[in-house]
């Protein structure tokens, strides 16, 4: 159990339940979060699942590998705490996680 909050660029917040073992991208899609397109289905090949992780949570989301780093490099709205949500596996350790959505996905 646990919850994750997605905050749209316009400030609208969506609180969803954690489904441990899923990716953050799948969690967003399953809960109809607007602004997560996930065009490649989680293959780290599109960049349309970009989220900006709250500063307090960036360590807990794990490391960025070279493929993700490369895709993030193509993301116009990249921030210091940007991640691709398909590369984050959710667990109860992420209870309370807050992520923000960029204004646009590329
Ligand atoms: S779903 Fe395509 S990079 Fe994440």
Image: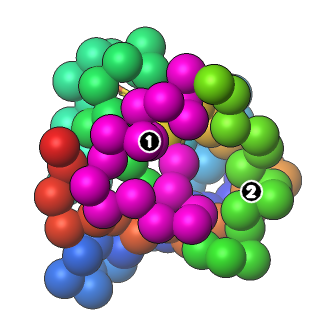
- The residue to which callout 1 is attached is 72
Taking 14 as reference, is 22 above or below it?
A: above
In the image, residue 73 lies in the stretch drawn in magenta = yes
Indicate the quadrant where residue 88 lies: top right
- Out of 70 and 1, give the one closest to the viewer: 70
What's the colour scheme? rainbow
- Out of 89 and 103, give the one closest to the viewer: 103
Tell me the element at label 1. helix
User: Number of labelled discs?
Assistant: 2
Tell me the element at label 2. helix
The location of residue 27, given as percent across then percent down, is 46, 40
Q: Which stretch appears magenta?
A: 67-83
Assess disc 2: are there few (<14), some (14-19) or many (≥20) residues with their C-alpha within 10 Å of its C-alpha: some
In the image, residue 79 lies in the stretch drawn in magenta = yes
Label at residue 45: none
Please name the residue shown 20% across and 49% down the image: 105
- The residue to which callout 2 is attached is 94
Question: In the picture provided, is 4 more to the left or to the right than 29?
Answer: right
- Out of 1 and 37, give the one closest to the viewer: 37
- Out of 55 and 65, give the one closest to the viewer: 65
The location of residue 65, given as percent across then percent down, is 68, 28
Indicate the quadrant where residue 91 lies: top right
- The mark closer to the camera, 2 or 1, is 1
Taking 8 as reference, is 46 above or below it?
A: above
Residue 96 in view in this figure: no
- The answer to whether mark 2 and mark 1 are in CB contact below 8 A is no
Q: Earlier in the sequence, mark 2 or mark 1?
A: 1
Please name the residue shown 60% across and 74% down the image: 54
* Distance Cα–Cα, label 2 vs label 1: 22 Å
Please name the residue shown 48% across and 30% down the image: 70
Classify the position of the C terminus by image quarter: top left
Please name the residue shown 30% across and 62% down the image: 77
């Amino acid at each position: 159990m646990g919850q994750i909050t997605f905050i749209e660029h316009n400030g609208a917040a969506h609180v969803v339940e954690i489904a441990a073992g899923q990716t953050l991208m799948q969690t967003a899609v399953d809960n109809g979060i607007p602004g997560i397109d996930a065009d490649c289905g989680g293959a780290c090949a599109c960049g349309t699942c970009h989220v900006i992780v709250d500063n307090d949570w960036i360590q807990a989301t794990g490391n960025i590998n070279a493929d993700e780093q490369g895709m993030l490099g193509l993301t116009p709205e990249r921030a210091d705490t940007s991640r691709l949500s398909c590369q984050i596996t959710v667990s109860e350790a992420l209870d309370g996680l807050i992520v923000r959505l960029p204004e646009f996905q590329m």
